[in-house]
Amino acid sequence: MTFRSKPAVKRSHRPSWEEKDRRNLYINIGFALVIFVGVLALVGAGAATYYAAHFSTVATVNGTSLNQDQLNDQATIDKFRIDQAEAQLADLNQLGRLSDSEYQTRLSVMEQQRSSVAGSTLDRLVDNTLQGQLAAQQGIIVTDAQVDQRLLDEATTKEQRRLSMISVQPEVSTGATVPTDAQKAAAKAKAEAALAEVKGGQKFADVAQKVSTDAYAANGGDTGWSLATEASLDSKLLAAAFATAKGGLTDVIEGADGSFRFAQVVDVAPQTVDPAWTSKIEDARIPMSTYRTAVRSDLVRDALKAKILADVTEQATAQRQVSEIFVSSADYQGPGDQVKVRHILYTPGDADPSTGSPLPSDAASLAAAKVKAQATYDKLKALQGDPAALLKEFETIAKTDSKDTTSGADGGQLGWFTQGQLDRGFGDAIFAQGLKDGDLVGPVQSQYGWHVILYEARRGPPEERINGLQTQVNAAGADFAALARANSDATDASTGGDMRWVARYQLAQDLEDAIFAAPVGKPSASLQTSDGYYLFLVRAEETRKPDAAQLSTLKTDAFTNWYTVQRAKAVISTDAAGTTP
């Protein structure tokens, strides 16, 4: 076998500069790719940031999406309006039409509104959207002309008038709650005589200080500057005053509260329009189209509210005549029963326990307090067989002697407490077994001093009480009114729980649902709420218009109650990441 050598391999020998150029080219291309990818990442991040800052969804309302730009716009408009309201208050203060104290009070309200803008803007944006949807369902349309008029209203400072007023409140007999016709006639005659004196040349301030029965009398009847819509003055009197020339006097007018009044128009500040209002909006970097959208939302809300109020106040609807028993759980801290007592407190050294300063603890001071408590106890013990006389005397002594002046002013009444809420010595004394309503207890020592106590009642926890009452009202022949008078914590307990007539949207939704679900003539099941438990008895049902008492409540609460129901029905989702500037 012959072995041959391998042929030599030819190697290419390129110049070293070519290899370097190729290597540099690859490096440059790689570097360019890195830069390109980085730029793409930055552009993507910037685009994502821009999208999040402007177009990301912050809420949906029945399928309608709301974005970050809309939220930002709403916040900017809210803040602009607060700024302008504060500026107007400052102007009125400088012109002397708003007192320093009133200016500071209103400015404080403005600052509270400003601090809550960030937290409330999203809710307001959601409400504007939902109310727009509800208004469309009601056939409500807001025109461009209405938006123009509202913009003009916003630019307008309304007319103000400085008034002096004389009021005469009718006298009310002891034990009565309303004046008689004769007492009303006497008050009117007194006001007419005062008006005649002013017309006859006597100074208004002198007559006001002599005759007027309201808080303005001390200042000669001066009520300061008022708008035609001033809530603190009677609406009928204001209407008359704003129809009277400067320096003139109104007639005597019977107010909503039954007082008889007349006023003198001391000065008039006419209505003015701010010609720079549009410029102020634009200077705040708010596009007019955006601001008009916000104004339109305001008008929609107002129109929707007016429509709903008209529906519930002017039309006959199904109503129910209702009685209630309410068992409060608001103050119940548990566990166990509650006891209600009155007390008279004698402190060592007659010190005031409400100051927070340590009470004297020397033996002499404690002994002196105990002697006083014992003397009062002995005096009251002699009346133990006459509950009415005992209660009356106890209340009298509490008002004059008790160092717990808060309860003392109320005849020593302390309300309902569980044992764990009280000083141990006091609590052990009033929760002792065997005590009966009207028993006198004491003297009892606590960390505050010595007490004389009138035991009034004991009751179980709220849930236990309502369960027992449910059984009682369902029993044959049960007297619901008597049970309400004896057990209800509601203000209408004295009238047997009589709530009179209840219409839709007059009450909160949970109460209304329970009332309208109950069978007529039979008690409802118990309803638990955040403040306690309710039982209702529907005595009758009729289709009727609201009476005067209902109208007052409906005008105040019906729209809010109605809208709460509609909002609960709506499909609303919000993104907590949505932020306002």
Image (cartoon, rainbow, N blue to C red):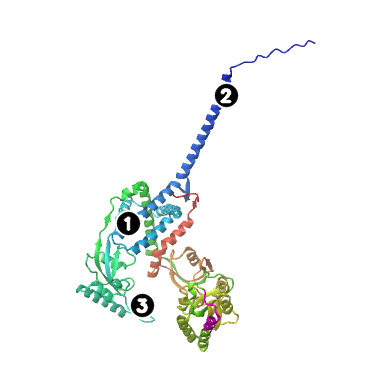
The x, y position of residue 321, in whole percent, is 45, 71
User: 131 or 207: which is nearer to us?
Assistant: 207
Q: Quadrant of residue 334?
A: bottom right
Residue for badge 2: 23
Q: Residue furthest left?
A: 200
Label 2, secondary structure: give it.
helix
Q: Which residues are magenta?
A: 358-370
**What number is the disc on residue 178?**
3
Amino acid carrying mark 3 in the image: Val
Q: Nearer the viewer, mark 1 or mark 2?
A: 2
Q: Is residue 24 left or right of residue 305?
A: right
The x, y position of residue 42, in whole percent, is 50, 37
Q: Is residue 204 in the magenta section?
A: no
Dot 3 or dot 1: first in sequence order is 1
Dot 3 or dot 2: first in sequence order is 2
Residue for badge 1: 88
Q: Pointer 3 and pointer 2: residues touching (CB < 8 Å)?
A: no
Residue in view at x 39 percent, y 70 percent: 549
**What number is the disc on residue 348?**
none
Amino acid carrying mark 1 in the image: Gln
The x, y position of residue 439, in whole percent, is 54, 84
